């Protein structure tokens, strides 16, 4: 199985975990999980009024993931005039943010970051130079006055 296929499988399992899937073999776990999460959000909106939250997501990949995850659940991320593209505003019930959206985002982001790091390191190692280690630390700089 390719690294990408493994990542996709891990993302599906994480989604099922956050959706509270009943059994690991649930045939339509992804769709059923999504519906359970949307139902939970609708339930929370009745008892826990949405709050406006501001997120700073400077990394392009994590920002894209966060936006997609919000939209998946029917949330509408936005920016205010003159806000940077790294800023994402969201109106969301606090309980949903704390119990579902943010923990799921963190898990998915970690999995995606790990995958992107592996792919980037492999490509650099194979196509540019096999030493992908960090720069060594020097005791003093020639640039010091």
Image (cartoon, helix red, strand yellow):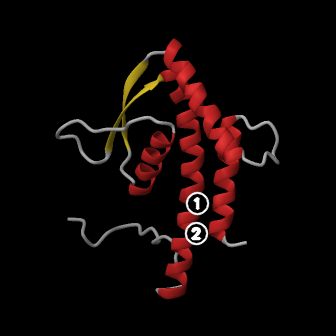
Residue 3 left/right relative to 61: right
Q: Can residue 21 be seen in this view?
A: yes
Q: Nearer the viewer, residue 9 or 124?
A: 9
Q: Name the residue under label 2.
A: 118
Q: Is residue 11 above or below residue 22?
A: below
Q: Can residue 131 be seen in this view?
A: no
- Percent across and percent down for residue 46 are 51, 14
- Percent across and percent down for residue 143 are 24, 69
Q: Mark 1 points at which residue?
A: 114
What secondary structure is marked by label 1? Answer: helix
Residue 122 left/right relative to 27: left
Report how many numbered discs are placed on residues in the image: 2
Q: Dots 2 and 1: beta carbons under 8 Å?
A: yes
Quarter of the image with the N terminus is bottom right
Q: Using the rendered view, name the quadrant where residue 119 is placed.
A: bottom right
Residue at x 68%, y 55% (from the top left corner): 10
Residue at x 59%, y 27% (from the top left corner): 39
């Amino acid at each position: 199985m390719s690294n990408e296929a493994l990542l996709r499988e891990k993302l599906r399992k994480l989604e099922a975990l956050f959706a509270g899937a009943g059994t690991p073999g649930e045939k339509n776990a992804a769709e059923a999980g999504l519906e359970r999460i949307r139902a939970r959000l609708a339930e929370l909106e009745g008892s826990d009024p949405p709050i406006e939250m501001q997120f700073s997501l400077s990394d392009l990949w994590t920002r894209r993931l966060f936006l997609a995850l919000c939209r998946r659940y029917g949330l509408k991320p936005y920016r205010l005039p003159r806000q940077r593209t790294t800023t994402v505003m969201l109106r969301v019930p606090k309980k949903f943010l704390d119990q579902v959206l943010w923990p799921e985002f963190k898990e998915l982001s970690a999995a995606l970051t790990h995958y992107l790091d592996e792919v980037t390191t492999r490509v650099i190692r194979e196509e540019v130079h096999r030493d992908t280690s960090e720069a060594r630390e020097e005791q003093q700089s020639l640039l010091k006055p």
